[in-house]
């Protein structure tokens, strides 16, 4: 059964390849990533990247990955000589990987496009006190295991504004993470430059 699934996926990808090259159009971009993680209500920020290829004038297949490596909260010091809020840093890290279609308005040369998207993938939430470096990011990806990865569904909306091939993109959506104990709905916002090719 597993072999049949792989063959079916390969056939679907090969069916889209001529369409991808016939359109000769796609997008790449980087973004700043903000997620309000529920139910613990933490504000997490990081960076990410995405790539998309048009399969139709109004449909794009898109893959993205985001890594949130910082979360700061304010703690009140009640026993201090001068009571004051103290910023504290958490070691919470979030890795998102999503893939799915983006349904967009406008054509290849539109200066403004609006879109809706539904993507599926995974989210890994972990704790690490290691410094945020590229080497440590790659060990986070290598260390993915079934017991620390949760299925994710992301419906969202957004807008893109272009001046020639260079543009700015904004997304907002509900990142639904499915834990063993149930679903967590999390506000997710991304923004950053995009380039058409």
Image (tube, rainbow, N blue to C red):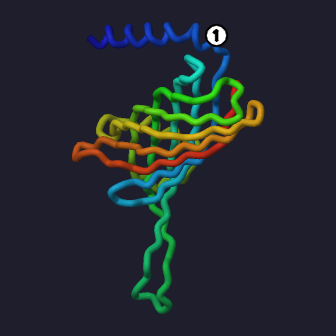
User: Dot 1: within a 10 Å radius of its alpha carbon, few (fewer than 14), some, or many (20 or more) residues?
Assistant: few
| Residue in front for this viewpoint, 152 or 57 | 57
Residue 180 image offset from top left, x and y in percent: 23, 43
Q: SS at mark 1?
A: helix
Query: Which corner quadrant of the image does residue 50 belong to?
Result: top right
Residue placed farthest to the left in the image?
181
Residue 11 image offset from top left, x and y in percent: 44, 7
- Residue at 42% x, 60% y is 42
Instruction: Identify whether 99 is placed above or below 6.
Output: below
| Residue in front for this viewpoint, 164 or 130 | 164
Residue placed farthest to the right in the image?
164
| Residue in front for this viewpoint, 26 or 49 | 26
Residue 60 image offset from top left, x and y in percent: 55, 24
Query: Which corner quadrant of the image does residue 169 belong to?
Result: top right
Instruction: Identify whether 80 is placed above or below 185.
Output: below
Residue placed farthest to the bottom in the image?
81
- Tell how many labels: 1
- Residue at 63% x, 12% y is 21
Residue 138 image offset from top left, x and y in percent: 52, 38
Query: Which corner quadrant of the image does residue 194 belong to?
Result: top right
Q: Which corner quadrant holds the C terminus? A: top right
The answer to whether residue 155 is left or right of residue 181 is: right
Q: Which corner quadrant holds the N terminus? A: top left
- Residue at 46% x, 67% y is 73
- Residue at 63% x, 38% y is 160
Residue placed farthest to the front in the image?
106
Residue beneath disc 1: 22
The answer to whether residue 90 is left or right of residue 170 is: left
């Amino acid at each position: 059964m597993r072999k049949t699934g792989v063959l079916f996926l390969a056939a679907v990808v090969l069916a889209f390849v001529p369409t991808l090259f016939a359109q000769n159009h796609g997008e790449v971009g980087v973004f700043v990533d903000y997620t309000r993680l529920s139910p613990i209500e933490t504000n997490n920020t990081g960076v990410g990247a995405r790539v998309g290829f048009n399969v139709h004038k109004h449909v794009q297949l898109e893959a993205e990955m985001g890594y949130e490596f910082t979360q700061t909260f304010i703690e009140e010091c009640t026993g201090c000589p001068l009571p004051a809020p103290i910023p504290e840093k958490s070691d919470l890290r979030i890795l998102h990987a999503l893939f799915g279609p983006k349904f967009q308005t406008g054509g290849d040369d539109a200066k403004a496009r609006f879109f809706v998207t539904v993507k599926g993938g995974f989210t890994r939430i972990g704790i690490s006190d290691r410094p945020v470096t590229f080497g440590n990011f790659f060990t986070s990806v290598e260390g993915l295991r079934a017991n620390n990865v949760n299925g994710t569904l992301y419906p969202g909306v957004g807008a893109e504004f272009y001046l020639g091939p260079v543009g700015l993109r904004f997304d907002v959506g509900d990142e639904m993470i499915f834990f063993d104990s149930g679903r967590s709905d999390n506000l997710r916002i991304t923004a950053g430059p995009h380039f058409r090719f």
